[in-house]
Every structure is written in structure tokens, then in C-alpha cells.
Amino acid sequence: MKLSSEEIEILKILEEDHKLPAATIASMVMSDEETVQNTIKKLEDQKIIMSYPTLINWSKVEGQSNIVAMIEVKVTPKRGVGFDEIAERIARFPEVSSLYLMSGAYDLSITIEGKTMQQIARFVSEKLSTFEHVVSTTTHFMLKKYKHDGVIFEGGDEKDRRMVVTP
Amino acid sequence: MKNEYSSYLSQTAKEIQPSGIRKFFDLAASMEGVISLGVGEPDFVTPWNIREATILSLEQGITSYTANPGLLELRQEICKYLKNRFSVQYNPKNQVIVTVGASQAIDLAFRAILNQGEEVLIVEPAFVAYGPLVSLAGGKPVPVSTSPENGFKVTPEQIEAAITEKTKAILICSPNNPTGTMLTKDELAELAKVIQKHDLILISDEIYAELSYDETFTSFAAIDGMYERTILINGFSKGFAMTGWRLGYLAAPAEFVSVMLKIYQYTTMCAPHMLQIGAIEALRNTFNEVEEMRKSYQRRRNYIVQSLNEIGLDCHTPGGAFYVFPSIRSTGLSSEEFAEELLKAEKVAVVPGNAFGESGEGYVRCSYATSMAQLQEALKRMQRFVESRKMVLQK
């Protein structure tokens, strides 16, 4: 969906702080209160704003969708600090949206978001794989998001199928 | 010691006034629960990729000196950046010096060009360091006052009126600290004519170049005929949120640079090596973050300008930096009284406008590089203060 730059601004403001009054948001984007209220209502109706604290389905907004990849990382743990030290350092990169220590075939599971494929490729090749303790990485790109944080994104519109009046 | 200590000190050093900002902040620092709109630095922490690159360089043991003007790799990135962003072309080999903060670059410029008693025009209101740096280099700072009616934009006539036979150079900072005023390309071209007519050297402080909101920033060096006489000053502090790193740079014709480099060799040697590594990363991979920060400032600017006007403090919309410069004349107070009373009554710190030169009297500087929550609270308190002043004035 193609949104105006003002609409995208409003989404970014709400994503940061969903409690700001419409009048304040209006002054930030140089608009008026009513327009902002209507815009927010519209974005909610279009399911671009999915819930609050603001969960936004950016993949619906043209030019704003992120590319997401899951990276499996094998790491040699460091004496004394185990996996913590390297995990904490990786976790600070803003591209990294989640990071877990896993049991099984690999050690760290990283979810990374970027604007372009190149950005993710650069993160893996220039940052992640150059860490001394990283043994190997396997990158999986995400193709489609069906459910995230308990919220169904696609095809999950559960209508109220009950009759209007029932005994 | 045979005499009073002051008799051992240099006359020039003694005559320099301590910064008006500092004086005021000692007072603010002694109070609790103060919301500060006085801070001249970003509220963002340096992006992690820059910090990480620096940490890595330390782990790898990169702790030696670099070449005097800085790592060639960094100078190349700086030149690439200046060319891509502002269409000004410099040779990394002999036209750039990486300095310890942009302030040092300005210091080097004055020391390289000034003879005893030569005058430098400083467009005011201005950053507090310019005048003292001119004095320390043996020159004489000459303020050129701008007027609020013109949005604090300097005019060719104002410059012309201040020129004497001793005038050597002019310093212009756009976007400006403290007014946030940004000069457009056409305005720069008009000023350029006067500067060229009188054969002045221009020191162009472009440290806020990344923080321009309504119009695209134009570098003064890109204006026709200015390249050959411009010492361009920039740095990483504001745009990249790297204030504490103290990394700046200058770019200028090679003949200027070679002299400045000579001074730099003897005073500083080089900027810290590991921080230069961080700066390379900043120029290569940080433009998404820089753009996000810029947009965030812009939203806050829009909010604070509208709110200040609503509570009765006239405020023009500044085109850049992260300062607004509202008039406080309606309260019947001087800049210093306003700042002090506001701090005491409502615990909001702003900087009195006269700290930046006489033409700043009647104004205060508010920085909006602080969170929206804090800004909202500060504005609420300022509104209360302005209302209470209205009551006083009515009686």
C-alpha cells in the first residue's frame, strides 16, 4: 500500500510512543488534530496498525517493508563468560531484532531486519562472521509473515460467525 | 612566588571571558529535578556499529599514532562524503586534516591566517568559542549583529558595514548555533559577492550540515568563487551523535592546509587512532541512523516551535540544528532574568540569548535534543511561568 510521507511519520511516532495525544502528533507533523485522528483510524481499519503498544505491519506499506532473516550461528564459548559476552555484543546492533541461545545443532539464533538484502549480507559478512569466536553462520531469509507476537498477520481474520440472535 | 599570581599570566588569556553558558549551568547543576533544554548535544548515543568498530580496533591492538592529518583511509572517506553530499571536491592527500573536535579545526584556521591585530567578522548570535579563539590567535573579533526581523540571517549590507582595512576573514555558521537559522543557496551567493569583493577568507562552520530540515543544505565552498578562499569546518559530533569523541575535520586549499598541518604537528600530532577507525565506520555504514535521527529532530522541532508560539513566546521556525531561539520580550524580563527565574520557579533550564552576543538579548536558546516526554513537561512548565508573568505585568 502506498502511504503519504505524513502517514509514515505518524506511524513512526506511534511506534515510538503510542500514548502521545493526537494534538501533539499533529504539531510534530505540522497538521491538525482531526486529520491525525482520521489518519490513525484509517490505518487501524487497514490493519496497518495492528495493536497497541503500536504493532505495525510495515510489510503492507510500500517502500517501508523490512527484509527479515534468521541466522543460525555456531560459536566457540569463551572461558569464564561462555556465550554471554559475544551474545551481548551482537545484540546491540540495531539490525538485530532478537537473539536467543539455543540447544541443539547451533548456538545462537539471530533474527535480523534490514532495508535491503545488501544490508543483511553486509552485516553477516563484515560484522558477524569476523567475530573471533564465530565458527559458522547459516542465513535463512524470511519469505512471508503469518503470525507475529500472537497476532495473525495474513488470512486470519476471524469473523464472528454466530447468528445475530441466539437463544 | 614574588608577586601576585595574576602577574605571571598572559594578558590575552586573562582578558578572555569565561563562557556565559558554563556560569549558568553551575547553578542548574546544583538543583534537582531540572529539565534541561540547555544541552548542546544530541540525546542519542553514538550508533552501536561505530562503537563496535572502535572496540574491535582496541582488541586488535590498534593503539599507535597515525599520520598527522589522520588515517588516509579516513581522509578518503571524508572526501567521498563531501563530494557525494555537498558536491565539493577535495584531495585526501593534501587538503584535509582530521582534528580533535571541530573547535580545534577553527583554532587551527585562525592561527594559520591571522597576524597581530587583524580582524575577523563573527556573525552573531554565535557559538561562544569563536571570539576567544580569534583573540588567542592574536586577532580581534568583530561582531556582526543580525536582526530577528530577518530571522537572524546576516545580510551583505551588515557585513559591508563592519569591514575595515584590517578585516582579514569572516566566520559563518549555518545552520547556526544558537538560532538554528540556515542560509539558503541564494543567500550564500549574495554573501559570497561581498566576501569576494573585499578579498576575505571564509571560515565556514558546517558542523550542523546533517541537521537541515526544510531545504537541502548547501556548503559555502560549493558557491561560485568561494572554494579557493574557504576553510570548511565539519565533524562527527552533531550529525553522528559523537560529541564526546571529539572528532572534527577541516578541508581547504592545499596552501592553507600545509600551514595548518605544521601547527597541528607540533600541538596535537594526530587525533586518537581508534576513534578514527570508528569515524571510518560512521561514514561508511551509518546513514540510515543519521537520517532517522534527523527526522526525529524535525518532528520535535515542529512540536516545540508551535508550542512556544502558543504559550506566547514568539519563535521563528529554524531551518536546521537542534535549537530554537524564542523571544521572551513579552514577559518583560531580560534574557538572564528569564532564564534564572524560569529555573528557580519551574526548574527548566534554557540558555540566555545574550551569552551568544548582544543581538541575542531578549531571546533564549532552547535545545530540543531531548525526549518528547521531557519536552512536553518542559513546555507545560514554561506555560505556567509565562502565565504567572502575565499576571505580574497586568498589576
Image (cartoon, grey):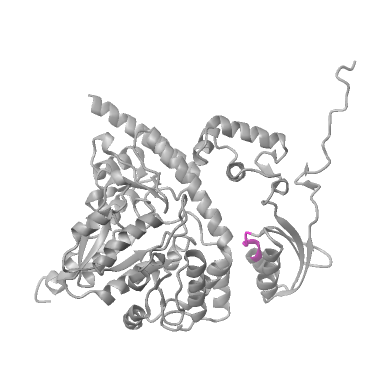
Quarter residue B32 falls in:
top left
- Residue A79 placed where, x, y %? 68, 75
Q: Is any atom of residue A81 visible in this view?
A: no
> Is residue B83 part of the magenta span, yes or no?
no
A9 horizontally vs B148: left or right: right
Q: Residue furthest left?
A: B2
Q: Nearer the viewer, residue B355 or B36?
A: B355
Q: Is residue B274 above or below residue B286?
A: below
Q: Nearer the viewer, residue A114 or B172?
A: B172
* Quarter of the rendering occupied by the N terminus of chain A: top right
Q: Is any atom of residue B85 visible in this view?
A: yes
Q: Main secondary structure of the magenta part?
A: loop
B316 horizontally vs A102: left or right: left
Q: Nearer the viewer, residue B317 or A16?
A: B317
Residue at image point 14% right, 74% down: B8
Residue at image point 58% right, 59% down: B288
- Residue B347 placed where, x, y %? 36, 41
* Quarter of the rendering occupied by the C terminus of chain A: top right
A152 horizontally vs A17: left or right: right
- Residue B163 placed where, x, y %? 19, 62
Q: Residue furthest right?
A: A167
Residue at image point 43% right, 41% down: B304
- Residue B134 placed where, x, y %? 24, 68
Report the span colored magenta.
A90-94
> Is residue A91 part of the magenta span, yes or no?
yes
